[in-house]
Image: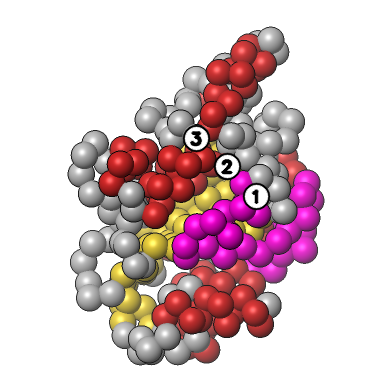
Amino acid sequence: MTNMQEMLGSMGEGEEGIATNVDIVFVIDATRSMQTTIDMVKESALSFQDKLYDFMDEAKRSINNLRIKVVWFRDFYYDGNYAYDESKFFELPEEKEEFRDFVNGIHEAGGGDDPESGLEALTMAMRSDFVQEGEKKRHIIVLFTDAAAHPFEDYDELTAEAAKKGCKPTMYPKNMPKNISEFYNAWEGNAMNQDALGCDGENTKLDADGRRIVLFAPNDYPWCDMEVNLSHVIRKDIEAGQGGSELEMNEVYTLIAYSM
């Protein structure tokens, strides 16, 4: 864990004590194997801000305003209308009960065979209405999954395979990246691929310097490549298919705090 702390802490060197407006989006795999992680997030919901602030103090960072949003996903190809949902941004601490209530409504279910729709969910999180005010901002996406992700470019093939089982991607989001390169370019801020973030010609609301992805994900496609090929991405390895059973919430707080 020390190496991760040093790596993430170096992103904000020289900025100790600067109050930051922080938006956090939890992207949670809600398929059957993920019960352990879902329960962990549920148990931490009401105390999330207080615990995070404790870790922020250790990292010598401070938060001016904190909002949190939740995206959960399963498999767009096999789970139909139960493949995806997202909340609004909740202001903490004022709306911590609403945050708790939304998280408590997540139930592990569905999912086709591994892989799942993690890339689409991550893209949807990147389209969020991130805070624009303040001298310093952090837009942090925290993804939890124990599975690989479907490649964007396999849409036609995967749709055909799902149809053989009587399934279809009824909720598949519009305007997804056509391939992983478009996704990478969108994250890095390449103007040619901003429409992959649903911007329709406008600038993305992701802050160029303040964007972060924290992955709690196995050594599978695309997570192991993403931490190498993209800027401002860090990954904590979890065992494939085990629902993050080895993960502790303190690790989540630590990586978020040091990504500030």
The amino acid type of the residue labelled 1 equals: Thr
Q: CA–CA distance between discs 1 and 2? A: 8 Å
SS under mark 1: loop
Residue lying at 48% horizontally and 26% vertically, measured from the top left: 172
The amino acid type of the residue labelled 3 equals: Asn
The residue labelled by disc 2 is 118
The residue labelled by disc 1 is 145
Instruction: Evaluate if marks 1 and 2 touch, with contact meaning CB atoms under 8 Å apart.
Output: yes
Q: Which mark is drawn over residue 179?
A: 3
Asked if residue 247 is among those painted magenta in the image, a careful observer would answer: yes
Q: Say whether disc 1 or disc 2 marks the residue closer to the N-terminus.
A: 2
Asked if residue 209 is among those painted magenta in the image, a careful observer would answer: no
Q: Position of residue 22 (x, y in %)?
A: 36, 68
Q: CA–CA distance between discs 2 and 3? A: 14 Å
**14 above or below 107?**
below
Left or right of residue 130, residue 70 in this image: right
The amino acid type of the residue labelled 2 equals: Gly
Q: Say whether disc 2 or disc 3 marks the residue closer to the N-terminus.
A: 2
Instruction: Evaluate if marks 1 and 3 touch, with contact meaning CB atoms under 8 Å apart.
Output: no
Q: Which range is magenta?
A: 222-250
Q: What quarter of the picture does the N terminus occupy?
A: bottom right
Q: Position of residue 35 (x, y in %)?
A: 71, 49
Residue lying at 58% horizontally and 60% vertically, measured from the top left: 228
Q: Position of residue 133 (x, y in %)?
A: 21, 66
